[in-house]
Image (tube, coloured by chain):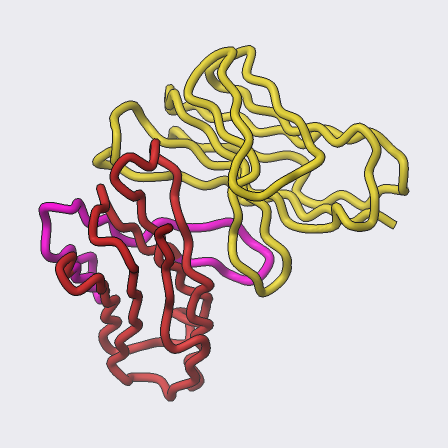
Chain colours: A red, B yellow
Amino acid sequence: KQEVTQIPAALSVPEGENLVLNCSFTDSAIYNLQWFRQDPGKGLTSLLLIQSSQREQTSGRLNASLDKSSGRSTLYIAASQPGDSATYLCALIPSGGYNKLIFGAGTRLAVHP
Amino acid sequence: EADIYQTPRYLVIGTGKKITLECSQTMGHDKMYWYQQDPGMELHLIHYSYGVNSTEKGDLSSESTVSRIRTEHFPLTLESARPSHTSQYLCASSPPGQGSLRGYTFGSGTRLTVV
């Protein structure tokens, strides 16, 4: 059974730091992996989607990488800002998973001025 | 702009009431999903649909039911609400194709409190 783990569970940093959020999964047979942002009490906003054949995706200050062989993905946030404070969720669709996303528990990020 | 809409945004209701949470999408997506999320916890799939008249139960057991009579509409119903149903319910959709290029789109969620 596919399991998704995110480390760290929580992170508090001063503004301006470069951050790395980690996501690991137990089965490398995946279709894609998606990073989401969730603000308190809100829905999910898609940040980056990486297809299984891709190694990384970039959007602005965000960069996500995927290494299927090691079962890992990282989300890199450059020059963090207080507005980046949120919970970041990693989710993937396993091969043969009929498009059902499997989520990690998330990393709660707080960026203070 | 195409999007996915959930109503109500917040709902406080008494035990035993019947409730329906609405979810609609304007993107023409064939697949739709309901996830349940308790505060500070993971999202768990409770229902999904691959198209009209297709509904399946998800990985987490739920007393709710769903229907898919129209492509764009995927309502969730609780026949008799209980305090244990208090949670956030998130609706999502994805376009045709396995492991689609554009991934999932989520609604803003309905925060349900049963008193």
- As drawn, the residue found furthest toward the front would be A1
- Left or right placement of residue B107 versus residue A36 in this view: right
The number of numbered badges drawn on the structure is 0
Q: Nearer the viewer, residue B89 or B9?
A: B89
Q: Residue at x 28, y 35 (%)?
A: A96
Q: Residue at x 25, y 25 (%)?
A: B97
* The magenta stretch spans residue A69: no
Q: Nearer the viewer, residue B47 or B8?
A: B47
Q: Is residue B86 above or below residue B27?
A: below
* The magenta stretch spans residue A42: yes
- Left or right placement of residue B18 versus residue B110 in this view: right
Q: Residue at x 66, y 38 (%)?
A: B62
Q: Nearer the viewer, residue A2 or A54?
A: A2
Tell me where residue A41 sits by quadrant.
bottom right
What is the magenta segment's predominant secondary structure?
A: strand
Q: Position of residue A22 (x, y in %)?
A: 29, 71
Q: Position of residue A99 (x, y in %)?
A: 34, 34
Q: Position of residue B65 (x, y in %)?
A: 66, 27
- Left or right placement of residue B87 versus residue A52 in this view: right
Q: Which residues are magenta?
A: A37-66
